Structures are given as C-alpha cells and as structure tokens.
Amino acid sequence: MKIYIILGALFLILVLLIFILGKICRKLQEEKASLEVANAKQKSNLAYLLKHAQEIAKIEENKDEIEEEIRGAKSDEEVANIINTIIDLNNSRVRKQTEN
C-alpha cells in the first residue's frame, strides 16, 4: 500500500516537472522569436549602413574630380551648373533609397 502512495507522489512530481519544463520551454521559444525579429532588424540596419558607406566612398572618389571641375570653371554659371548636377545626382540617390 505504501508503495502505491510513493508511486503516486512520484507520478505527481513528474507531472509537475513536465508542466514547469513546458512553461519554461514556451517562454524560451517566445524569447527566441523576439530575438530573431531583433536580429533581422539589425541585419537590415547593417545592410542600410553598408550601402550608405559605399555611397559615401563613391562620393569621396569623385570629390577630387569635382573640385578640379570647379577650379577649372571659367564663370560662376559653370560652377552653378556643376553644383546643380551634384544636387540632382544626390536627390536621385535619395529618391532611390526611399523607394527601397
């Protein structure tokens, strides 16, 4: 008779442990899903920063050429045209970024 009481108590303890472990497992799954969303957002941010850094590098490459064009300009109108071209290129770049 005592053995049945002990087995019943052990069975109850096992059921409680399984229940507790199930709750812990669910919480870990929720946390994992949350971390996956945060990770995806960080990857997206890193991709955006990489693209931005590449665009800045491209601008830096063209900087010397642009400065030379401005120095070689013979009139204020030529300088204004060069600057307007730069502004138009930048505006189109920004538009492309906002579309993506």
Image: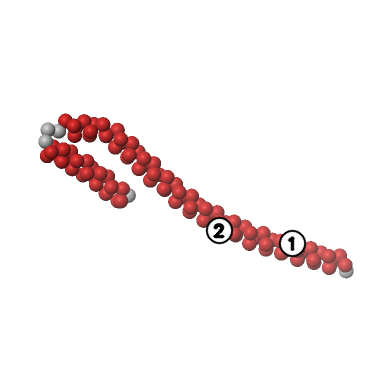
Mark seen at residue 40: none
Residue positioned 59% across, 59% down in the render: 27
Q: Residue furthest right?
A: 1
Residue 79 vertical placement versus 22 (above, below): above
Looking at the rendering, which quadrant does residue 9 occupy? bottom right
Q: Mark 2: which secondary structure?
A: helix
Q: Would you call the spot at circle 1 few (<14 residues within 10 Å), some (14-19), or many (20 or more)?
A: few
* Residue under numbered circle 2: 30
Coordinates of residue 66 in the picture (x, y in percent): 22, 34
Residue 17 vertical placement versus 46 (above, below): below
Q: Mark 1: which secondary structure?
A: helix
Coordinates of residue 13 in the picture (x, y in percent): 75, 63
Q: Earlier in the sequence, mark 2 or mark 1?
A: 1
Viewer-closest of 90 and 20: 90
The image quadrant where one finds the N terminus is bottom right
Viewer-closest of 63 and 96: 63
Viewer-closest of 71 and 50: 71
Closest to the camera, between mark 2 and mark 1, is 2
Viewer-closest of 21 and 45: 45
Instruction: State if disc 1 and disc 2 touch (CB < 8 Å).
Output: no
* Residue under numbered circle 1: 14
Specify the amino acid type for callout 1: Leu
User: Distance of mark 2 from mark 1, alpha carbons?
Assistant: 24 Å
Looking at the rendering, which quadrant does residue 26 occupy? bottom right
Q: Would you call the spot at circle 2 few (<14 residues within 10 Å), some (14-19), or many (20 or more)?
A: few
Coordinates of residue 12 in the picture (x, y in percent): 75, 66
Q: Is residue 1 left or right of residue 89?
A: right
Specify the amino acid type for callout 2: Glu
Residue positioned 56% across, 56% down in the render: 31
How many numbered circles are shown? Answer: 2
